Amino acid sequence: MMNFFHTLLHPDHEDDLERAQIARAANLLQVGEFQLLQLAYNAWFGRDIPSENVNNLFKSYMFHNEVPHWARHYARRIFALDKSGMLNDLDLRYHRYDSDYRVRAPQGVIRFCAMTAIVVFFLGGMLLLSHMIAQKGGSILPPYFEREEIPPPASPLRERTFHPKG
């Protein structure tokens, strides 16, 4: 029972050092442990795991803590790439077994500018249309005043009158 709670509190903790290395390499690639085994098999043998061997590999890894030598080698390669700063966990070759994995990249400045122009045109058009429908309005933007509420402009001469101090 204590092992259960320990696993809940520390799901990344692994007592077996070899399995801990596989788990760490899988975390670096953002894939599952068994998927890392599939990638390691493909890298070592140049082909996918034969379907008749999948269950045996899964049982030996998950239930008996047996880590194949080619998986340890692959994990060391991942650690070396990570240490050198050359590991790209978004590389599609690491996600070849993910059926729904897609890298979403921005489409660029042109698309952003086009969408911004559409939004500005739409909002500006709605603002102009609302002003045209109101007909009596004296201003386009809030606060909205009626034409009768807006005082006439003051005479420029009145504002510039100079009163000398005594």
Image (tube, rainbow, N blue to C red):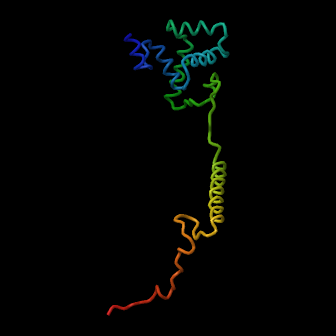
| Residue reaching furthest to the bottom | 166
The image shows residue 30 at horizontal and vertical percentages of 54, 26
The image shows residue 6 at horizontal and vertical percentages of 39, 16
Give above or below for 4 relative to 83: above
Quarter the N terminus occupies: top left
Give above or below for 104 relative to 108: above
Give above or below for 139 relative to 26: below
| Residue reaching furthest to the left | 166
> On the rendered structure, is 64 left or right of 122?
left
Residue drawn at the location 42% of the way across and 16% of the way down: 7
Residue drawn at the location 52% of the way across and 10% of the way down: 62
Quarter the C terminus occupies: bottom left
The image shows residue 84 at horizontal and vertical percentages of 51, 30
Which image quadrant is residue 123 in?
Answer: bottom right
Which image quadrant is residue 164 in?
Answer: bottom left
Residue drawn at the location 65% of the way across and 64% of the way down: 133
